[in-house]
Amino acid sequence: MRVQQVVRSFMFYGEYIHSIDRKGRLILPAKFREVAKGNFIEKFFVTRGLDRCLFMFAEEEWKVQEQKFKSISFTKQEARVFNRLYFSGAVEVTIDRQGRVLLPQYLKDFAEIKKDIVIVGVSNRIEIWSKEKWQEFYGNWRQSFEEIAQKIIESY
């Protein structure tokens, strides 16, 4: 008799504009809270992301990413630097009853978050951007979207 392993699949999609409250909390979009509740996600991990945003992973996905990065040889300097910055920035967070998540100041400083933010669902992760940084990123890359898509899709 074969036991089949069930892997839960959850996805976050969309772009939402929010604000950080006086206590440094953000409200997770209702759609993301529904995904979390429907998949019994209680913990998330937030860390330094790329392009000056923050990455937020559900605990299960965080463990998958952690395994990938732990397998990179620590004898390579770039791997050591990346892992140090990535994991030293990580913090475990939970969503309170009002759907809020507290972000530490050092992560807000890294992402240059002051008040207005954009929360972006990128399939297996959530990205948290300062509104200004998101507008800059989007403005710089939207014209190249089709060209990039063609290159990436052709490589599969």
Image (cartoon, helix red, strand yellow):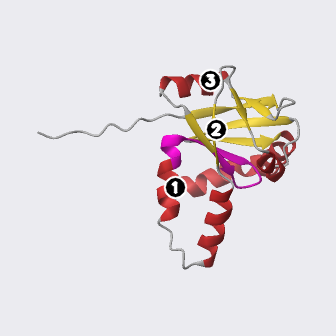
Residue at position x 62%, y 78% from top? 77
Q: Which residue is mark 2?
A: 93
Residue at position x 54%, y 26% from top? 35
Q: Which residue is mark 3?
A: 31
- Label 3 residue SS: helix
Tell me the CA gap for discs 1 and 3: 26 Å
Q: Amino acid at mark 1?
A: Glu
Tell me the CA gap for discs 2 and 1: 16 Å
Q: Amino acid at mark 2?
A: Val
- Residues in magenta, as a range: 46-62
Q: Which residue is mark 1?
A: 66
Eye-nearest disc, 3 or 2: 2
Tell me the CA gap for discs 3 and 2: 18 Å
Eye-nearest disc, 2 or 1: 2
For label 2, count other residues whose C-alpha is less than 10 Å away and answer few (under 14), some (14-19) or many (20+): many
Which percent across, then down, holds residue 94? 62, 33
- Answer whether residue 120 is magenta in the image: no
The part of the image, by quadrant, that contains residue 31 is top right
Residue at position x 50%, y 74% from top? 73
- Label 2 residue SS: strand
The part of the image, by quadrant, that contains residue 151 is bottom right
Question: Along the polypeptide, which appears first: circle 3 or circle 2?
Answer: 3
For label 3, count other residues whose C-alpha is less than 10 Å away and answer few (under 14), some (14-19) or many (20+): few
Which percent across, then down, holds residue 123? 56, 39
Q: Amino acid at mark 3?
A: Lys
Question: Along the polypeptide, which appears first: circle 1 or circle 3?
Answer: 3
Q: What quarter of the picture does the N terminus occupy?
A: top left
Find out whether the residues at labels 2 and 1 contact each other: C-beta distance under 8 Å: no
Report whether residue 156 is seen.
Answer: no
Which percent across, then down, holds residue 148? 65, 54
Residue 150 vs residue 25: left or right?
A: left
